[in-house]
Image (cartoon, rainbow, N blue to C red):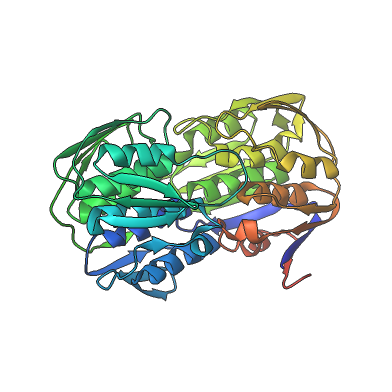
Protein backbone atom coordinates (compact mmCIF):
# COMPACT_ATOMS: atom_id res chain seq x y z
CA UNK A 1 0.00 0.00 0.00
CA UNK A 2 1.44 3.39 -1.01
CA UNK A 3 2.36 6.16 1.40
CA UNK A 4 3.08 9.83 0.88
CA UNK A 5 5.95 11.39 2.81
CA UNK A 6 6.26 15.16 3.15
CA UNK A 7 9.09 17.14 4.71
CA UNK A 8 7.81 20.58 5.67
CA UNK A 9 7.36 23.40 5.80
CA UNK A 10 7.03 24.13 2.08
CA UNK A 11 6.79 27.31 0.03
CA UNK A 12 4.84 26.87 -3.22
CA UNK A 13 5.75 28.81 -6.32
CA UNK A 14 5.20 28.33 -10.06
CA UNK A 15 2.27 27.18 -12.16
CA UNK A 16 0.04 24.11 -12.17
CA UNK A 17 -2.57 22.78 -14.61
CA UNK A 18 -5.90 21.39 -13.43
CA UNK A 19 -7.14 18.00 -14.61
CA UNK A 20 -10.58 17.07 -15.85
CA UNK A 21 -13.35 16.89 -13.27
CA UNK A 22 -13.91 13.46 -11.77
CA UNK A 23 -17.46 14.31 -10.72
CA UNK A 24 -18.32 15.41 -14.26
CA UNK A 25 -16.48 12.62 -16.06
CA UNK A 26 -18.22 9.81 -14.15
CA UNK A 27 -21.82 10.53 -15.26
CA UNK A 28 -20.71 11.57 -18.75
CA UNK A 29 -18.92 8.24 -19.21
CA UNK A 30 -22.00 6.41 -17.90
CA UNK A 31 -24.24 8.31 -20.33
CA UNK A 32 -22.66 6.23 -23.11
CA UNK A 33 -25.06 3.47 -22.03
CA UNK A 34 -27.96 5.49 -23.43
CA UNK A 35 -27.29 4.78 -27.11
CA UNK A 36 -25.34 2.77 -29.65
CA UNK A 37 -22.31 4.11 -31.47
CA UNK A 38 -18.86 5.13 -30.28
CA UNK A 39 -18.43 7.95 -27.80
CA UNK A 40 -15.20 9.94 -27.61
CA UNK A 41 -14.81 11.58 -24.21
CA UNK A 42 -11.72 13.75 -23.71
CA UNK A 43 -10.07 15.43 -20.71
CA UNK A 44 -10.80 12.35 -18.60
CA UNK A 45 -8.47 12.26 -15.56
CA UNK A 46 -6.45 9.20 -14.56
CA UNK A 47 -8.11 8.35 -11.24
CA UNK A 48 -9.11 5.24 -9.36
CA UNK A 49 -12.81 6.16 -9.53
CA UNK A 50 -12.54 6.54 -13.30
CA UNK A 51 -10.91 3.11 -13.56
CA UNK A 52 -13.76 1.70 -11.47
CA UNK A 53 -16.52 3.10 -13.70
CA UNK A 54 -14.73 2.03 -16.89
CA UNK A 55 -14.33 -1.48 -15.46
CA UNK A 56 -18.03 -1.52 -14.66
CA UNK A 57 -18.94 -0.43 -18.20
CA UNK A 58 -16.71 -3.20 -19.57
CA UNK A 59 -18.42 -5.69 -17.26
CA UNK A 60 -21.79 -4.65 -18.71
CA UNK A 61 -20.49 -5.41 -22.21
CA UNK A 62 -19.26 -2.03 -23.42
CA UNK A 63 -16.05 -1.77 -25.43
CA UNK A 64 -13.71 0.66 -23.69
CA UNK A 65 -10.46 2.01 -25.11
CA UNK A 66 -8.29 4.60 -23.41
CA UNK A 67 -5.51 6.71 -24.91
CA UNK A 68 -4.03 9.24 -22.48
CA UNK A 69 -6.85 11.66 -21.59
CA UNK A 70 -9.33 10.31 -24.18
CA UNK A 71 -11.73 7.43 -23.69
CA UNK A 72 -13.69 5.76 -26.50
CA UNK A 73 -16.76 3.77 -25.46
CA UNK A 74 -19.15 1.69 -27.52
CA UNK A 75 -22.28 0.27 -25.88
CA UNK A 76 -23.44 -1.63 -28.96
CA UNK A 77 -22.87 -5.01 -27.35
CA UNK A 78 -24.31 -4.51 -23.87
CA UNK A 79 -25.24 -8.00 -22.73
CA UNK A 80 -25.29 -7.71 -18.94
CA UNK A 81 -27.60 -5.52 -16.89
CA UNK A 82 -26.17 -6.21 -13.44
CA UNK A 83 -23.67 -4.06 -11.55
CA UNK A 84 -22.38 -6.50 -8.91
CA UNK A 85 -21.18 -5.64 -5.44
CA UNK A 86 -17.54 -6.32 -6.29
CA UNK A 87 -17.74 -3.69 -9.04
CA UNK A 88 -19.44 -0.93 -7.05
CA UNK A 89 -18.39 -1.41 -3.42
CA UNK A 90 -15.72 1.31 -3.49
CA UNK A 91 -17.68 4.09 -5.20
CA UNK A 92 -21.15 5.51 -4.68
CA UNK A 93 -21.25 6.99 -8.18
CA UNK A 94 -21.71 3.46 -9.54
CA UNK A 95 -25.43 3.90 -8.85
CA UNK A 96 -25.46 6.19 -11.91
CA UNK A 97 -25.74 3.18 -14.23
CA UNK A 98 -29.24 2.48 -12.86
CA UNK A 99 -31.07 5.23 -14.75
CA UNK A 100 -29.45 4.70 -18.18
CA UNK A 101 -29.81 0.89 -18.08
CA UNK A 102 -33.45 1.17 -17.12
CA UNK A 103 -34.18 3.82 -19.76
CA UNK A 104 -32.56 2.01 -22.69
CA UNK A 105 -32.87 -1.67 -21.78
CA UNK A 106 -35.92 -1.57 -19.48
CA UNK A 107 -34.14 -3.48 -16.70
CA UNK A 108 -31.25 -3.19 -14.27
CA UNK A 109 -29.84 -4.88 -11.20
CA UNK A 110 -27.43 -2.70 -9.25
CA UNK A 111 -25.76 -3.38 -5.92
CA UNK A 112 -26.28 -0.80 -3.22
CA UNK A 113 -23.12 1.31 -3.48
CA UNK A 114 -20.15 1.95 -1.20
CA UNK A 115 -17.66 4.83 -1.06
CA UNK A 116 -16.25 7.22 1.53
CA UNK A 117 -17.61 6.85 5.07
CA UNK A 118 -18.57 10.50 5.48
CA UNK A 119 -22.25 10.13 6.35
CA UNK A 120 -25.60 8.90 5.17
CA UNK A 121 -26.19 9.31 1.45
CA UNK A 122 -29.26 7.15 0.91
CA UNK A 123 -30.42 6.42 -2.62
CA UNK A 124 -34.10 6.45 -1.68
CA UNK A 125 -34.47 9.73 -3.59
CA UNK A 126 -33.24 7.98 -6.77
CA UNK A 127 -35.62 5.05 -6.29
CA UNK A 128 -38.69 7.13 -5.48
CA UNK A 129 -38.04 9.28 -8.55
CA UNK A 130 -37.65 6.24 -10.82
CA UNK A 131 -40.94 4.85 -9.51
CA UNK A 132 -42.62 8.12 -10.52
CA UNK A 133 -41.23 7.60 -14.00
CA UNK A 134 -42.90 4.18 -14.12
CA UNK A 135 -40.23 1.81 -12.83
CA UNK A 136 -40.95 -1.19 -10.63
CA UNK A 137 -38.32 -1.20 -7.88
CA UNK A 138 -37.47 -4.05 -5.52
CA UNK A 139 -34.68 -4.32 -2.93
CA UNK A 140 -33.34 -7.85 -2.56
CA UNK A 141 -30.15 -9.09 -0.88
CA UNK A 142 -28.38 -5.75 -1.12
CA UNK A 143 -29.41 -5.11 -4.73
CA UNK A 144 -31.77 -2.69 -6.44
CA UNK A 145 -33.76 -4.67 -9.01
CA UNK A 146 -35.59 -2.40 -11.44
CA UNK A 147 -37.72 -3.00 -14.50
CA UNK A 148 -40.19 -1.06 -16.60
CA UNK A 149 -42.46 -1.44 -19.60
CA UNK A 150 -41.32 2.04 -20.59
CA UNK A 151 -40.52 5.17 -18.62
CA UNK A 152 -42.94 8.08 -18.80
CA UNK A 153 -42.30 11.71 -17.94
CA UNK A 154 -43.38 13.00 -14.55
CA UNK A 155 -42.92 15.89 -12.14
CA UNK A 156 -40.38 14.94 -9.48
CA UNK A 157 -39.60 16.94 -6.34
CA UNK A 158 -36.43 16.07 -4.42
CA UNK A 159 -36.84 16.51 -0.67
CA UNK A 160 -33.21 17.60 -0.58
CA UNK A 161 -30.94 18.48 -3.50
CA UNK A 162 -29.06 15.36 -4.61
CA UNK A 163 -26.28 15.50 -7.17
CA UNK A 164 -26.25 11.85 -8.24
CA UNK A 165 -30.04 11.70 -7.93
CA UNK A 166 -30.42 14.66 -10.29
CA UNK A 167 -27.92 13.13 -12.73
CA UNK A 168 -29.55 9.70 -12.62
CA UNK A 169 -33.03 11.08 -13.28
CA UNK A 170 -31.80 13.46 -15.95
CA UNK A 171 -30.25 10.56 -17.87
CA UNK A 172 -33.25 8.28 -17.39
CA UNK A 173 -35.71 10.98 -18.46
CA UNK A 174 -33.95 11.62 -21.78
CA UNK A 175 -35.52 8.41 -23.16
CA UNK A 176 -38.80 8.62 -21.24
CA UNK A 177 -42.04 9.33 -23.06
CA UNK A 178 -43.16 12.91 -22.48
CA UNK A 179 -41.80 15.68 -20.29
CA UNK A 180 -40.05 15.27 -16.95
CA UNK A 181 -39.58 18.18 -14.54
CA UNK A 182 -37.04 17.86 -11.71
CA UNK A 183 -37.71 20.30 -8.88
CA UNK A 184 -35.33 21.20 -6.05
CA UNK A 185 -32.56 19.77 -8.22
CA UNK A 186 -28.90 20.07 -7.39
CA UNK A 187 -27.23 22.97 -9.21
CA UNK A 188 -23.58 21.90 -9.37
CA UNK A 189 -21.56 22.78 -12.51
CA UNK A 190 -20.97 19.06 -13.08
CA UNK A 191 -24.72 18.64 -13.62
CA UNK A 192 -24.65 21.39 -16.24
CA UNK A 193 -21.71 19.65 -17.91
CA UNK A 194 -23.69 16.40 -18.07
CA UNK A 195 -26.72 18.24 -19.46
CA UNK A 196 -24.53 19.81 -22.16
CA UNK A 197 -23.19 16.37 -23.10
CA UNK A 198 -26.68 14.87 -23.23
CA UNK A 199 -27.99 17.74 -25.36
CA UNK A 200 -25.11 17.17 -27.74
CA UNK A 201 -26.36 13.57 -27.96
CA UNK A 202 -29.79 14.81 -29.05
CA UNK A 203 -31.55 15.28 -25.71
CA UNK A 204 -33.72 18.31 -24.90
CA UNK A 205 -32.74 19.51 -21.43
CA UNK A 206 -33.23 23.02 -20.11
CA UNK A 207 -32.68 24.61 -16.72
CA UNK A 208 -29.51 22.74 -15.72
CA UNK A 209 -27.69 24.85 -13.15
CA UNK A 210 -31.00 25.98 -11.62
CA UNK A 211 -33.24 24.17 -9.16
CA UNK A 212 -35.76 23.25 -11.88
CA UNK A 213 -34.66 21.10 -14.80
CA UNK A 214 -36.97 20.16 -17.68
CA UNK A 215 -36.28 17.14 -19.89
CA UNK A 216 -38.30 16.45 -23.02
CA UNK A 217 -37.96 12.75 -23.78
CA UNK A 218 -36.75 11.59 -27.19
CA UNK A 219 -36.95 8.19 -28.92
CA UNK A 220 -33.20 7.77 -29.22
CA UNK A 221 -29.87 9.46 -28.64
CA UNK A 222 -26.68 9.37 -30.70
CA UNK A 223 -23.06 8.95 -29.75
CA UNK A 224 -20.99 12.12 -29.58
CA UNK A 225 -17.60 13.60 -28.79
CA UNK A 226 -17.36 15.68 -25.63
CA UNK A 227 -14.69 17.36 -23.51
CA UNK A 228 -15.12 17.13 -19.73
CA UNK A 229 -14.92 20.36 -17.70
CA UNK A 230 -11.97 21.12 -15.39
CA UNK A 231 -12.07 19.96 -11.76
CA UNK A 232 -13.22 22.78 -9.48
CA UNK A 233 -12.43 20.83 -6.29
CA UNK A 234 -8.85 20.22 -7.40
CA UNK A 235 -8.64 23.93 -8.23
CA UNK A 236 -9.96 24.83 -4.78
CA UNK A 237 -7.54 22.44 -3.11
CA UNK A 238 -4.58 24.17 -4.78
CA UNK A 239 -5.96 27.60 -3.87
CA UNK A 240 -6.09 26.57 -0.21
CA UNK A 241 -2.69 24.86 -0.33
CA UNK A 242 -1.02 28.01 -1.63
CA UNK A 243 -2.88 30.15 0.90
CA UNK A 244 -1.71 27.89 3.72
CA UNK A 245 1.93 27.55 2.67
CA UNK A 246 2.55 31.01 1.26
CA UNK A 247 4.07 31.74 -2.10
CA UNK A 248 2.68 32.54 -5.50
CA UNK A 249 1.11 30.09 -7.96
CA UNK A 250 -0.74 30.47 -11.25
CA UNK A 251 -3.44 27.83 -11.50
CA UNK A 252 -4.18 27.13 -15.17
CA UNK A 253 -7.10 25.48 -16.98
CA UNK A 254 -9.71 26.33 -14.38
CA UNK A 255 -12.94 28.31 -14.03
CA UNK A 256 -13.08 30.79 -11.15
CA UNK A 257 -16.85 31.23 -11.57
CA UNK A 258 -17.34 27.73 -10.16
CA UNK A 259 -15.48 28.70 -6.96
CA UNK A 260 -16.98 32.05 -6.07
CA UNK A 261 -17.90 30.97 -2.53
CA UNK A 262 -14.35 29.77 -1.79
CA UNK A 263 -12.68 32.77 -3.41
CA UNK A 264 -14.87 35.11 -1.39
CA UNK A 265 -13.81 33.41 1.84
CA UNK A 266 -10.12 33.28 0.95
CA UNK A 267 -10.17 36.96 -0.01
CA UNK A 268 -11.81 37.79 3.32
CA UNK A 269 -9.03 35.82 5.02
CA UNK A 270 -6.40 38.03 3.37
CA UNK A 271 -5.34 35.88 0.42
CA UNK A 272 -4.66 37.80 -2.82
CA UNK A 273 -6.50 36.24 -5.76
CA UNK A 274 -6.64 37.46 -9.35
CA UNK A 275 -8.99 35.68 -11.74
CA UNK A 276 -8.60 35.51 -15.51
CA UNK A 277 -10.74 33.72 -18.09
CA UNK A 278 -9.19 30.28 -17.54
CA UNK A 279 -6.61 30.82 -14.83
CA UNK A 280 -6.26 32.08 -11.25
CA UNK A 281 -3.20 33.74 -9.71
CA UNK A 282 -3.03 33.24 -5.95
CA UNK A 283 -0.56 34.91 -3.55
CA UNK A 284 -0.28 34.48 0.19
CA UNK A 285 1.89 35.94 2.92
CA UNK A 286 0.47 33.42 5.44
CA UNK A 287 -1.16 36.17 7.49
CA UNK A 288 -4.61 34.61 7.58
CA UNK A 289 -7.71 36.13 9.16
CA UNK A 290 -10.18 33.91 10.97
CA UNK A 291 -13.45 32.95 9.28
CA UNK A 292 -16.93 31.58 9.95
CA UNK A 293 -17.95 29.12 7.22
CA UNK A 294 -21.02 26.97 6.60
CA UNK A 295 -21.04 24.29 3.92
CA UNK A 296 -24.06 24.45 1.63
CA UNK A 297 -25.21 22.94 -1.65
CA UNK A 298 -23.82 24.74 -4.71
CA UNK A 299 -23.43 27.71 -5.13
CA UNK A 300 -22.67 27.77 -1.40
CA UNK A 301 -19.36 26.76 0.15
CA UNK A 302 -18.60 23.18 -0.98
CA UNK A 303 -18.42 20.39 1.57
CA UNK A 304 -15.65 18.89 -0.59
CA UNK A 305 -13.36 21.77 0.45
CA UNK A 306 -14.26 21.88 4.13
CA UNK A 307 -11.42 19.63 5.36
CA UNK A 308 -8.81 21.52 3.35
CA UNK A 309 -10.03 24.90 4.60
CA UNK A 310 -9.88 23.65 8.18
CA UNK A 311 -6.12 23.16 7.83
CA UNK A 312 -5.71 26.74 6.58
CA UNK A 313 -7.76 28.08 9.50
CA UNK A 314 -5.51 26.31 11.98
CA UNK A 315 -2.97 28.99 10.97
CA UNK A 316 -5.38 31.94 11.12
CA UNK A 317 -5.38 34.87 13.55
CA UNK A 318 -7.93 33.89 16.20
CA UNK A 319 -10.62 31.24 16.33
CA UNK A 320 -12.63 30.12 13.30
CA UNK A 321 -15.89 28.18 13.07
CA UNK A 322 -16.92 25.68 10.39
CA UNK A 323 -20.44 24.25 10.32
CA UNK A 324 -20.89 21.14 8.17
CA UNK A 325 -24.45 21.10 6.83
CA UNK A 326 -24.14 18.40 4.16
CA UNK A 327 -22.65 15.25 5.73
CA UNK A 328 -22.90 14.41 9.41
CA UNK A 329 -19.65 12.43 9.59
CA UNK A 330 -17.34 14.71 7.67
CA UNK A 331 -15.01 15.59 10.54
CA UNK A 332 -13.09 12.30 10.46
CA UNK A 333 -9.91 14.19 9.55
CA UNK A 334 -9.97 16.15 12.81
CA UNK A 335 -8.45 13.36 14.88
CA UNK A 336 -5.52 13.12 12.48
CA UNK A 337 -5.01 16.90 12.41
CA UNK A 338 -4.94 16.88 16.21
CA UNK A 339 -2.10 14.37 16.03
CA UNK A 340 -0.17 17.05 14.19
CA UNK A 341 -0.92 19.67 16.85
CA UNK A 342 -4.12 21.30 15.59
CA UNK A 343 -6.45 22.66 18.28
CA UNK A 344 -9.94 21.76 17.06
CA UNK A 345 -13.09 21.21 19.10
CA UNK A 346 -16.12 19.41 17.67
CA UNK A 347 -19.69 19.97 18.82
CA UNK A 348 -22.12 18.06 16.61
CA UNK A 349 -21.84 19.53 13.13
CA UNK A 350 -19.70 22.50 14.24
CA UNK A 351 -15.93 22.67 14.51
CA UNK A 352 -14.09 25.45 16.35
CA UNK A 353 -10.52 25.84 15.11
CA UNK A 354 -8.05 27.76 17.27
CA UNK A 355 -5.73 29.56 14.90
CA UNK A 356 -2.03 30.28 14.80
CA UNK A 357 -1.26 26.77 16.00
CA UNK A 358 2.09 25.33 14.87
CA UNK A 359 1.78 21.91 13.26
CA UNK A 360 4.39 19.17 13.55
CA UNK A 361 4.94 16.26 11.19
CA UNK A 362 3.49 12.93 12.33
CA UNK A 363 2.28 9.59 10.98
CA UNK A 364 -1.35 10.08 9.93
CA UNK A 365 -3.99 8.06 8.11
CA UNK A 366 -6.39 9.22 5.41
CA UNK A 367 -10.02 8.40 6.16
CA UNK A 368 -11.69 9.61 2.96
CA UNK A 369 -10.95 11.41 -0.29
CA UNK A 370 -11.06 15.04 0.80
CA UNK A 371 -9.62 14.25 4.25
CA UNK A 372 -6.56 12.87 2.48
CA UNK A 373 -6.08 16.19 0.68
CA UNK A 374 -6.33 18.05 3.98
CA UNK A 375 -3.57 15.89 5.44
CA UNK A 376 -1.35 16.65 2.46
CA UNK A 377 -1.84 20.40 3.05
CA UNK A 378 -1.17 19.91 6.75
CA UNK A 379 2.05 18.08 5.88
CA UNK A 380 3.11 20.96 3.64
CA UNK A 381 2.88 23.51 6.47
CA UNK A 382 4.02 21.25 9.35
CA UNK A 383 7.59 21.26 10.57
CA UNK A 384 9.27 17.91 10.11
CA UNK A 385 8.22 14.65 8.48
CA UNK A 386 4.61 13.74 7.80
CA UNK A 387 3.81 10.21 6.66
CA UNK A 388 0.34 9.70 5.19
CA UNK A 389 -1.01 6.17 4.80
CA UNK A 390 -4.12 4.91 2.99
CA UNK A 391 -3.47 7.32 0.13
CA UNK A 392 -5.65 5.18 -2.13
CA UNK A 393 -8.35 7.57 -0.95
CA UNK A 394 -6.38 10.43 -2.51
CA UNK A 395 -5.96 8.54 -5.77
CA UNK A 396 -9.73 8.25 -6.14
CA UNK A 397 -10.07 11.97 -6.85
CA UNK A 398 -6.74 13.71 -7.44
CA UNK A 399 -4.59 13.08 -10.50
CA UNK A 400 -0.90 12.99 -9.49
CA UNK A 401 -1.37 15.52 -6.69
CA UNK A 402 2.01 14.65 -5.21
CA UNK A 403 3.79 15.20 -8.54
CA UNK A 404 2.03 18.50 -9.17
CA UNK A 405 3.00 19.76 -5.72
CA UNK A 406 6.57 18.65 -6.31
CA UNK A 407 6.79 20.87 -9.40
CA UNK A 408 5.74 23.78 -7.17
CA UNK A 409 8.61 23.16 -4.78
CA UNK A 410 7.11 20.82 -2.18
CA UNK A 411 9.38 18.20 -0.63
CA UNK A 412 7.00 15.33 -1.21
CA UNK A 413 7.41 11.78 -2.41
CA UNK A 414 5.31 8.67 -2.87
CA UNK A 415 6.63 5.43 -1.46
CA UNK A 416 4.99 2.55 -3.33
CA UNK A 417 4.01 -0.83 -1.99
CA UNK A 418 4.64 -0.13 1.69
CA UNK A 419 3.10 -2.75 3.97
Task: Examine the image and state in which quarter residue 355 appears.
Answer: top right
Task: Examine the image and state in which quarter residue 269 appears.
Answer: top right
312 left or right of 22 in image: right
x and y, in percent, of residue 163 in the image: 42, 41
398 left or right of 317 in image: left
x and y, in percent, of residue 342 in the image: 81, 37
Please name whichever residue, 373 or 160, is drawn nearer the observer in this view of the structure: 160
92 left or right of 239 in image: left
13 left or right of 93 in image: right
Task: Give me the residue at 71% from left, 52% from top.
Answer: 366
Q: Could you tell me if residue 412 is visible in this image?
A: no
Up/down of 336 relative to 417, above or below: above
x and y, in percent, of residue 80 in the image: 34, 68
Please name whichever residue, 399 or 255, is drawn nearer the observer in this view of the structure: 399
Q: Could you tell me if residue 176 is visible in this image?
A: yes
Q: Quadrant of the C terminus?
A: bottom right
Please name whichever residue, 61 or 195, is drawn nearer the observer in this view of the structure: 61
Amino acid sequence: MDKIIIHGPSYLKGEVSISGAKNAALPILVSSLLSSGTYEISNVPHLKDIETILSLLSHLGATVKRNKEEVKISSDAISCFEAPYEQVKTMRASILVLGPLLARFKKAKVSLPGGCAIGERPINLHLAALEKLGADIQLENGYVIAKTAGLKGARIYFDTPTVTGTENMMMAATLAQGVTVLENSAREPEITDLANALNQMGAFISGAGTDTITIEGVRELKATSYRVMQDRIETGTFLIAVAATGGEVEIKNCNSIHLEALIEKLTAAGVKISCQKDSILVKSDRIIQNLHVQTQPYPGFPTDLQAQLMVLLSQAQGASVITENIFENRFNHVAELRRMGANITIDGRTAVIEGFTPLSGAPVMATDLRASASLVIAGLIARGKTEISRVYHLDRGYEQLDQKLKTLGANIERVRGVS
